[in-house]
Every structure is written in structure tokens, then in C-alpha cells.
Image (cartoon, rainbow, N blue to C red):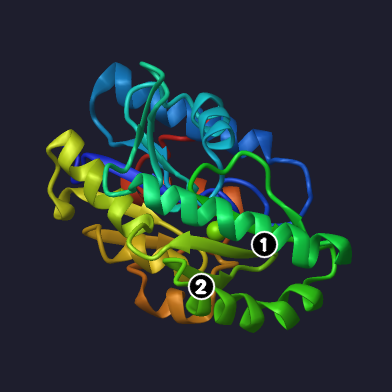
Amino acid sequence: MPPRFDLIVSDIDGCLQPESNDAMDLESLARVARWNALAVERRDRPIVTVCSGRPQPFAEAMCKLIGNLHVPCICENGVWLYHPGTNEYAMDPAISIGDREAVREAAAWLESTFGPRGVSQQPGKSASVSLFHRDTSVLRAIEPRIAEECEHRGWPLRVSMTWLYINCDLKHISKATGMRRLMADLGLRQERLAGIGDTMSDLAILENVGWFACPSNAAGPLQTRAHYVAREPEARGVVEILDQLAGSARSITAG
Ligand SMILES: [Mg+2]
């Protein structure tokens, strides 16, 4: 029977790897890699790629770990489409030189204003800034101030809070624009895509796929929108979702 979907797009943090600083679940990732190997060999199931706010090198490493060398991934919340097989990096052409100047200006202001308070910037970002502090209450306290400064300076940035970071992303770039570029690049229609995510920013995945699933740790409001919620969390949940897609009669990821 031909597969129902052509591609599965999964978030990374809180899905393929723990949101916490725990080690990766290599056993589950090996199962995802096995799934991808069979997807290539038998062409009977959709390959799994990633869509993440993480910088390109991390998404590249995750693709190599799960054996996706065949389909681009989305990184830095839509800034990049990166093809792990051909090593082609494609920044969204909607990002102008002026946009990148604004990001650099904002990064310099953020560093001088909050750096002395121990707020660091995640390395490896090209057209966005992610701020980290080991005490997330510090981040929560400064988020409104940052949004206000972006507004005041005319920096075209959307300021949002994840579990552990403040993300400052270009307003016209998101996981959703990345999803649309990916679909255009591969000539795929939305109804032929499946998605996996765990936080509200993954609504951008949900709204651009035909079927969406969550691991058990996903945010409640996202779970209510999902077609399937796994009993297991994080990478074990992803494996359960793949099994669900394959049909309960045959556990494709087993063994
Ligand atoms: Mg996540």
C-alpha cells in the first residue's frame, strides 16, 4: 500500500531530544534512523526530517543521527533550509541585508545591556538572537523590556519565550515560512505532510501539515489540536508516533 504521507517534519527539543540537559535517547534515535533507512530502501514510508529553532549545525547533526541525508531540514526557526545530503545552505531570500543589520544591532544592544547580568546569546545563529540564562525567571523579567526596545528602535523582531530561551526572530520568518519553502522546494502538498511538535511555536508545523502528533510532554493546548498524542514522552513518543503511522499491525521501528 502506498504511504499516506510523503514526509514527516519533527521538532527537535522536547521531541527528538530531551528539553532538559539529559543525554539523548540513542536507542529511540536509532529506531528513527532505522525507519529512515527503510524509507529510502523500500520507499514504503515517509522520511523524517527536522524543523527547529536550533542553529544549522545542530539540525545538521540531528539529521545525520537519524539518517536523513535526503531531504532538507528547517533550522533557526525558518531562517535556513539546509540539505544534509548535498550540504546546501539556503537562507530565506526574504531576509534582506537590512534585516541582518537590524539583527546585529539588536544583538549588540542585548549584549551590552544584559550580558553583564549573565544573559548569554546562543552561538551559531545567523539572522536571529536567542538569549539564555540558567535562571529562566531572569529571562521572563527582561522579555517585556526587550520587546519594547525592538519596537522603539524599529527592529523588525518578534520576541517570544520558549521553555529556556528568549527568541528574537525576524517578524516575517518563522517555522511556518520554513515549512512553505520546504514544500515548494520538494513540490509537496500540505495534506501529504505529517508533523510532530511539543510547544505552541509548533503550531506553525501543525498548520502546514495534513496530520499532526505530539509526544506526551507536549503543551496541553497543542495536544488538543493534535490528531494523535503519544503515551510516551520525547524521543520514545516520536517512535510511538512512527509506529502509529505505520499501523499497529506491524511495528516497523522495532528491532
Ligand atoms: Mg520543542
Question: Mark 1, residues whose alpha carbon is within 10 Å: few (<14), some, or many (≥20)?
Answer: some
Q: What is the quadrant of the N terminus in the image?
A: top left
Q: Nearer the viewer, residue 247 or 95?
A: 95
Cβ atoms under marks 1 and 2 closer than 8 Å: yes
Q: What is the quadrant of the C terminus in the image?
A: top right
Q: Quadrant of residue 177?
A: bottom left
Any part of residue 96 in sight: yes
Q: Amino acid at mark 1?
A: Trp
Residue 239, position as x, y percentages in the image: 50, 45
Q: Is mark 1 within 8 Å of ligand 1?
A: no
Residue 162, position as x, y percentages in the image: 60, 68
Q: Image height check: is 230 above or below 255? A: below
Q: Identify the residue shown where x is 36% and y is 70%.
A: 226
Instruction: Give me the disc on residue 153.
Output: 2
Instruction: Give me the disc on residue 109.
Output: 1
Position of 209 with respect to 30 (left or right) is left
Q: Amino acid at mark 2?
A: Arg
Q: Nearer the viewer, residue 151 or 123?
A: 151
Residue 48, position as x, y percentages in the image: 38, 38
Q: Quadrant of residue 251?
A: top left
Q: Image height check: is 38 above or below 232? A: above
Residue 28, position as x, y percentages in the image: 60, 39
- For marks 1 and 2, the one nearer the N-term is 1
Q: Identify the residue shown where x is 51% and y is 29%.
A: 60
Q: CA distance from mark 1 to mark 2?
A: 11 Å
Q: Quadrant of residue 134?
A: bottom right
Any part of residue 14 in sight: no
Question: Mark 2, residues whose alpha carbon is within 10 Å: few (<14), some, or many (≥20)?
Answer: few
Instruction: Give me the disc on residue 157.
Output: none
